[in-house]
Image (spheres, rainbow, N blue to C red):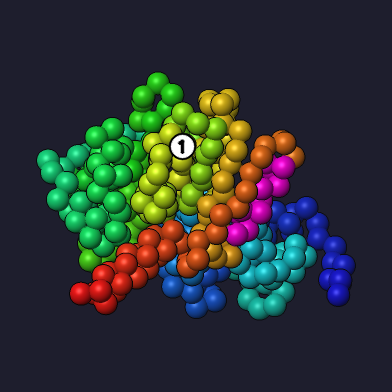
Amino acid sequence: MSTEYIHFTAEQKEAARQTDLVALLQSQGERLKRSGKEYVWRDGSEKVTVRGNLWFHQYERIGGDAVDFVRRFYNMDFPQAVNFLLGNNGGALPQAEPVKREPPKPFTLPPKNDNMRRVYAYLLNRRGIDREVLSAFVHKGMIYESADYHNAVFVGYDEHGIARHAHKRGTGSESTYKGNAESCDPRYSFHWTGTDSTLYLFEAPIDMLSFISLHKENWRSHSYAAACCVGDQVLFQMLKANPNINTVCLCMDNDAAGQAANKRISDKLFIQGIKHEVLVPKLKDWNEDLLCDEQEETECQTLQL
């Protein structure tokens, strides 16, 4: 069913785009949390930052203005979104003050802790990562424990060995924190460069480490990358920097966002003539598969005793 045509002037469209998103969300009864100069709103379990009329989805790495927000999260088309924001379905919403764009800060790694006890306990005991696999990344300076919050830090380096990306994961028993350090370059998120022609792409570093733990045979010869979102910039940067790679395995999560990303990236690879396949975890993600596999192995050993 097509939407009824509504004519909007350029001024009306711009007014809708400039709607203050905090006021909008509060008017809809949504929960917001202040974080510095921004507000945080949750799209399910994922974080969306809001400031003025602008928003940014921290996991999917996309954003836009107020019209884009209503279209994306309230499932409206353009005329419906503009009409809604202009207050034609209720009271008019205030306009956002212009957001002063500050120059990005230079990228810096979080300070290192003097030991890695919490990170080892978290990744080995709670996440089930293979000790040999974990040690290989630690010895290359790709995983460490931060001094401030004791997060696990997953470092991505460029072709010259310069750190350009850091993904942080909380290690506390109740922590669900995950996020990238400020001013990261997504082309160089957490990755391993092997020697053969195959590259595996994941959403998160723990998914990547879990997959390797499940498939350890000759793992060092393959290449792996964790986008730290559902993006593809690290994939195409690795293809550019490593012309020997001619096969890509897409290994995103087994959920709507992950499978949508698999389809989107698969279409790009098809157009470029790059051989690829999609690998889907049996459960929600590769870490759940790993933990389930370890649990089944333990149960089998118990039955044999």
- Residue at image coords 74%, 59%: 12
- Residue at image coords 78%, 53%: 10
- Residue at image coords 62%, 48%: 277
Task: Assign the C terminus to one quadrant of the image.
Answer: bottom left
- Point out residue 239 in the picture as x, y percentages from the top left corner: 57, 31
Q: Number of callouts in the render?
A: 1
User: Counting other residues with Cα less than 10 Å from the Cα at mark 1, is it few (<14), some (14-19), or many (20 or more)?
Assistant: some
Which quarter of the figure has residue 32? Answer: bottom left
Q: Could you tell me if residue 88 is visible in this image?
A: yes
> As displayed, is residue 272 above or below residue 82?
above
Q: Tell me which segment is drawn in magenta.
A: 259-270
- Residue at image coords 16%, 42%: 113
Q: Is residue 129 left or right of residue 47?
A: left
Q: Nearer the viewer, residue 119 or 72?
A: 119
Magenta-highlighted stretch: main secondary structure?
A: helix
Kindly state the secondary structure of the residue where label 1 is placed: loop
- Point out residue 22 in the picture as x, y percentages from the top left corner: 50, 64
> As displayed, is residue 2 above or below residue 244?
below
Q: Is residue 148 left or right of residue 201?
A: left
- Point out residue 11 in the picture as x, y percentages from the top left corner: 74, 54
Which amino acid, mark 1?
Answer: His
Q: Nearer the viewer, residue 172 or 80?
A: 172
The residue singled out by tag 1 in the image is: 222
Name, please, the residue furthest toward the front. Answer: 304
- Point out residue 27 in the picture as x, y percentages from the top left corner: 53, 75
Residue 265 part of the magenta-drawn span: yes
Name, please, the residue furthest toward the left. Answer: 114
Residue 145 part of the magenta-drawn span: no
Q: Nearer the viewer, residue 5 or 254?
A: 254
